[in-house]
Amino acid sequence: MSDPLPSCTPLRTSPIVFMVALLLMFAFSGVTLAQADDAFGEAADPVRLFERGQNAHARGDLAKALEFYEEAIKVRPEFPEAEFQRANVLVSLGRKVEAEAGFRRTIELKKGWSLPYSALGTLLVGLNRDSEAEPILRQALKLDVQNNLALRMLADIRLRAGDAKEALKLTQTATSDDDAPAATWMLRALAERMSNDKPAALASLEHILKLEPNNLSALMERAEIRIAMEDKPRALEDLAAAEKLIRGDKAAASRVAAAYDLTGKPEEARRIAQSAGLISLSQPSADGSIKVGGTAEEIEAANNPDPTISTKALESLLAKNPGNAMLMARLGAAYRTTNPARSLDFYRRALEVAPHNVDYATGYSSALVQARRFGDAIAVLRQVISAAPENYTAHANLATALYALKQYPQALPEYEWLLRAKPELTVPHYFIATAHDYLGEYDEALTAYELFLAHADPKTNQLEIEKVNLRLPSLRRQIKLGQGVKRKPGQTRKP
């Protein structure tokens, strides 16, 4: 669902989060077989060919890995592990049509293996083919009925499709697990709010805030629901708590300001907006509040949780407010996953109107990453971080873009920054490990893999845990044999 005006970030799956999930699926895979040092009979031995493919894959030599996987398949046509790894390489090479065929071939050969279903479903979502991804993800759930990740993915798909009923059913199943994370409960709260069941949404948000008292999104959701229920005193309590958590996040500041405006506190709204750099002292509305020209019905529709309704309303408001950068940015966010090309265009236009707006530049870079224009994204992100060194989203986008371009030495410091900013994170450990692995820094890779396993959630990170466990035996063997790049004590990576 979308944030209330004038925020430019709808409440739906973050592209960064999505790009991270997609890269986790495909960036590195480790299916390990026995090490073979001699080459005797290797030309006719599919296992040895596969092992050589794995070693090349670990080094980041995708062309050579693809060659070995294909040779293994020629020798043994029914070799699902080689098919799966070949498909992973094809994804990394951007050959998505062939990758899709490879995942489908893997499923044909090994129908009871959940990994290719998850990989194929994620690939299809990344290609904006949600309707095709759904049955694949549902099959993954048939193989593992408690697959919390698949439940969340499907719920998010249904939310974006405006199907609150199905999304709610999926999230209710996911949250039946006592260990369901706050993110799963948030999806449930969004589905309940979209279903207009405000008491149920409040109950889910209460659960989140018991787990994470400083969850900004949960506080804002609860504040907005309380405003709609005319419980302004408690809504103001939530907004006061949320305001302390903004910490330079302009999208969050915009949302808090809009909520204050709805409570009849325009002076508070304006104070927060000015503090965040969203408006200047020379740009207040006549009554001091933050407004967009349009009818009350249009404003309400623009804030509707149904993306089909809100997007149409935003288009209408932009026609009435030509040149309004905030509306352009809102549309950029609205189209981010459904129409990346339009998203990119709207963010570009917003940035042209307000070239110094860090929030719009961050959104533009996210759209560039979504469009896989990683080089362009890096150029914008360097400027964003120069202006706002603590911009977490910009650092996450930069890490993703650098990793996708195989600029691992430059990506590593960004992932390390993310861990310093949020030590509780798990995903950066995985990327740090695979980056070291690709660089042949096997000792560092092993340490990072072990850190990842120590922090990983068996359900949320099920796919990555399986990949790491498959990789570790071969990695330990390589270290024992003295393979890999060794750095001298105190030596650092060259940028």
Image (cartoon, grey):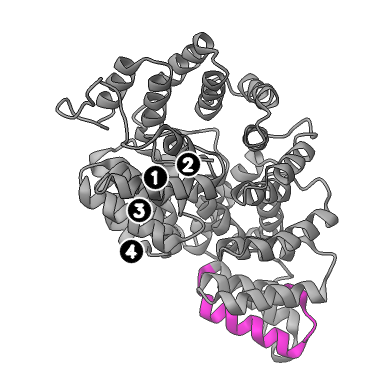
Residue 94 percent across, percent down from the top left? 50, 73
- As drawn, which residue projects farthest toward the left? 282
Question: Is the residue 19 above or below the residue 250 in the image?
Answer: below
User: Residues at badges 1 and 3 in contact (C-beta under 8 Å)?
Assistant: no
> For the residues carrying marks 1 and 3, which lies nearer the camera in this image?
1
Q: Please provide the residue range marked out in magenta.
A: 59-81
Q: Residue at x 33, y 16 (%)?
A: 268
Identify the element where label 3 is drawn. helix
Neighbours of disc 4 within 10 Å: few (<14), some (14-19), many (20+): some
Sequence order check, earlier mark of 4 and 2? 2
Q: Distance of mark 4 from mark 1, alpha carbons?
A: 24 Å
Tell me which corner region of the image, top left, top right, bottom left or bottom right, holds residue 471. Answer: bottom right
User: Residues at badges 2 and 1 in contact (C-beta under 8 Å)?
Assistant: yes
Question: Magenta region's main secondary structure?
Answer: helix
Sequence order check, earlier mark of 4 and 1? 1
Three-letter amino acid code at the position of disc 1 = Arg
Between 484 and 191, the residue placed more toward the observer is: 191
Which residue position is annotated with label 1? 330
Identify the element where label 1 is drawn. helix
Q: Residue at x 45, y 18 (%)?
A: 239
Sequence order check, earlier mark of 1 and 3? 1
Neighbours of disc 3 within 10 Å: few (<14), some (14-19), many (20+): many
**Taking 368 as reference, is 223 left or right?**
right
How many numbered circles are shown? 4
Which residue position is annotated with label 3? 365
Three-letter amino acid code at the position of disc 4 = Gly
Sequence order check, earlier mark of 2 and 1? 2
Circle on res. 10:
2
The magenta stretch spans residue 65: yes
Which residue position is annotated with label 4? 375
